[in-house]
Structure formats: structure tokens, C-alpha cells
Amino acid sequence: MLLEQGQSYVFEFNSIIDLRPAVASDPSQVIAWFDPGTLDLGGGDKAMLEIFPNSLSDSPLSSTVTIDEFPSGREGVSYWWSWGGPHPEPPFFPDLQGVLRVTMLSGSAQLSGFEVAQVINGEFYSGYTAVPEPAVGTLLRAGLVCLLIFRIEEEDDQQMCCRQGRDSGFVARWTRSAHPA
């Protein structure tokens, strides 16, 4: 989904997949991923990721930290928190649900999806969700509109042809009856 300056995309999730028991290297993170080459970090593109525990009315965690995934070239806006060490943070999504919002602060970029990963009660939960491309829906709607217009024009043509045929038939009958053979 193409995000232009000032536009936002909101993603709500209500589950994260329990993959396995957690290990020390498992990240607790949220990343909003962009298609490779579309978030021009050197050219002034900047996006903000806001993370809400339940709804947009909650106080969010915010990040404008961008990362570049090598070698894929995907860029993302990310937020990490600690679950291990001497002062682990409690899980941000203990009920496995939340809301994410990405806003383009400057420039434009193609948002591709969201990655949510978190350690909860010794288990590692993680998932990726692709952002649906509205162009597919737009194309489908445009196709249906064209089909509808085509059907209406076709019916109008048929009705016009029938009217012309009836008129011609009427004239022909009148002509025949006015001038008997």
C-alpha cells in the first residue's frame, strides 16, 4: 500500500502464533516493513510507527527508528523492548492483540506488512501479516462498474433496436394495409 506524506495505515491484530519455547536470542519487537527501495532513507522519507496495546485511544509507544534488512533490501520502522536481563519489561501484548499505526511524516513509500514478535510467559510468539493491496479491490470494482455500464448500454441498444423494429413493423403494416395488394 502506497503511503504518501501525512497518510496513515492502521493494522489491528487479535492473535500472534505461539512458535516454540523462547530462547535468549528471541526478539520482542514490532516492525512495519516497506518494499525494497521505496523508503528512501537518504532522500528524506520518514515514517513513524505507533504501537497501541488495545485500541487507538490507548497511549502508544512510538518509533521513527528505521532499519535496512540485508540482503533483501527491505526497510522498516521498528520498536524493540527487552524481555530478558536484570530488568525485563512486561509483555506489551499479554493478551496477544494490539493495534499498530504507521504514518508517513515525509516522502512516500510502499508499506508491505507488519511483523510482531514477543516473548510471553516463556513462549516465543511471532507472526507477519502482509498489507492488502487496495489496487486489487479497486480493479475489481472498476471491472464491475465497466461490466454494469456495458450491460446497461447493451440493454439500451436492444431496446432501441426493438423500438426501431416495432416502428418499422408498424409502418410496414400500415403501408401494407393502406395499399392492399
Image (cartoon, grey):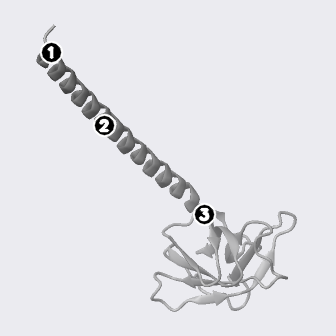
- Tag 1: Cα neighbours inside 10 Å, few (<14), some, or many (≥20)? few
Residue 46: image quadrant is bottom right
Q: Residue at x 78, y 66 (%)?
A: 36
> What secondary structure is found at the residue carrying circle 2?
helix
**Residue mark closest to the camera, 1 vs 2:** 1
Q: Tell whether label 3 touches label 1 (CB within 8 Å).
A: no
User: Can residue 116 be seen from the camera position used here?
Assistant: no
List the residue tagged with mark 3: 129
Q: Residue furthest front?
A: 179
Q: Residues within 10 Å of mark 2 (few under 14, many from 20)?
A: few
What residue is shown with label 2? 160
Element class at badge 3: strand
Q: Position of residue 23 (x, y in %)?
A: 73, 70
Residue at x-position 39% and y-position 47%: 148
**Label 1 is placed on what type of residue?**
His
Q: Is residue 175 above or below residue 150?
A: above
What whole-number distance in Å separates the C-alpha atoms at marks 1 and 2? 28 Å
Q: Separation of disc 1 and disc 3 at Cα?
A: 79 Å
Rendered location of residue 57, percent (x, y)? 45, 88
Q: Which residue is mark 1?
A: 179
- Contact between labelled residues 2 and 3, with CB atoms less than 8 Å apart: no
Which comes before the other along the chain, label 1 or label 2? Answer: 2
Instruction: Name the image quarter holding the C terminus.
Output: top left
- Residue kind at label 3, given as amino acid type: Thr
> Would residue 111 be visible to someone looking at this image?
yes
Picture coordinates of residue 110 (x, y %)? 69, 69
Q: Are marks 1 and 2 in contact (CB under 8 Å)?
A: no
Q: Quadrant of residue 113?
A: bottom right
Using the image as rendered, state which of residue 53 and residue 85 is in the foreground: 53
Mark before the other along the chain sequence, 1 or 3: 3
Query: Identity of the amino acid at label 2?
Result: Met
